[in-house]
Amino acid sequence: MKNRHAFTLIELLIVVAIIGILAAIAVPNFMNAQIRAKVARSQADMKNLGTAIEAFRLDHNAMLVDFWDEGSPIALERLKKWGFCSPDNLDDAVRNQKCILGNLTSPVSYMSAIPNDPFFGNITNTSDRLVIALAGTYFYGDNEAMIEGNDHNFSALWPGNAELLGLRPLGENQWALLGMGPDTTADELGNTQQRGLPYDATNGLRSRGDITMRG
């Protein structure tokens, strides 16, 4: 009768230790790969949005109405004229980003659908009014000369703040798009100076900042 040899306890512990070491190496690499993929997707989404925004601007000889354009007569006139926002969403207090960017899909289809920010599902401050208004997509804001005031816009990009942060200010009639980025934080109304601070992976894959595109 042949003797059957089983693993000894020490051998089993060695195998378990090796598996644990491999997992400790593989899991972070997998998570980092996911983050890089989401960053790439955000950048591609915003590039497509930027192309649509410029096409819309060329056709209408006007900029989109952004979240911070208050209830100015010009903003309300455009919202009513372009007709994507429901009457309940015209006021800036309840306006959301899907309403703002929706004019890129209808009545003229500059893009087929408004993309969702891949980092939005992991957002941390879900109760903030700004987060609710995002509706899962990207921030759009501009510095349009015809509409005064910037309220709580992309403060890191405004003259004064931008220079202190080593950034180029958002010029007159320029716009910007922001994505949450790996920090998954939308800077709240009490901390607006950080809003628009560009994400830079060289500072760390999960470093603070917003994925930013300007036009």
Image (spheres, rainbow, N blue to C red):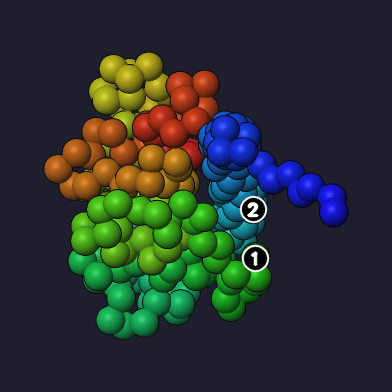
Left of 131 or right of it: where is 175?
A: right
Q: Amino acid at mark 2?
A: Asn
Residue located at (62% from left, 38% from top):
8
Which quadrant is the N terminus positioned in? bottom right
Q: Amino acid at mark 1?
A: Met
- Most extreme residue toward the bottom is 87
> Of the residues under marks 1 and 2, which one precedes in the sequence?
2
Q: Which residue is mark 1?
A: 111
Q: Nearer the viewer, residue 121 or 54?
A: 121
Residue located at (45% from left, 47% from top):
179
Marks 1 and 2 in Cβ contact (< 8 Å): yes
Q: Nearer the viewer, residue 196 or 200?
A: 200
Residue located at (84% from left, 50% from top):
2
Numbered-mark total: 2
Per the image, label 2 sits on a secondary structure element best described as: helix
For residue 31, what is the image quadrant? top right
Left of 67 or right of it: where is 26?
A: right
Question: Is residue 36 among the parts visible in the rendering?
Answer: no
For residue 185, what is the image quadrant? top left
Q: Position of residue 109 (x, y in %)?
A: 65, 71
Residue located at (19% from left, 39% from top):
191
- Most extreme residue toward the front is 1
Q: Nearer the viewer, residue 93 or 54?
A: 93
Q: Which residue is mark 2?
A: 48
Question: Is residue 184 among the parts visible in the rendering?
Answer: yes
149 above or below 77?
above
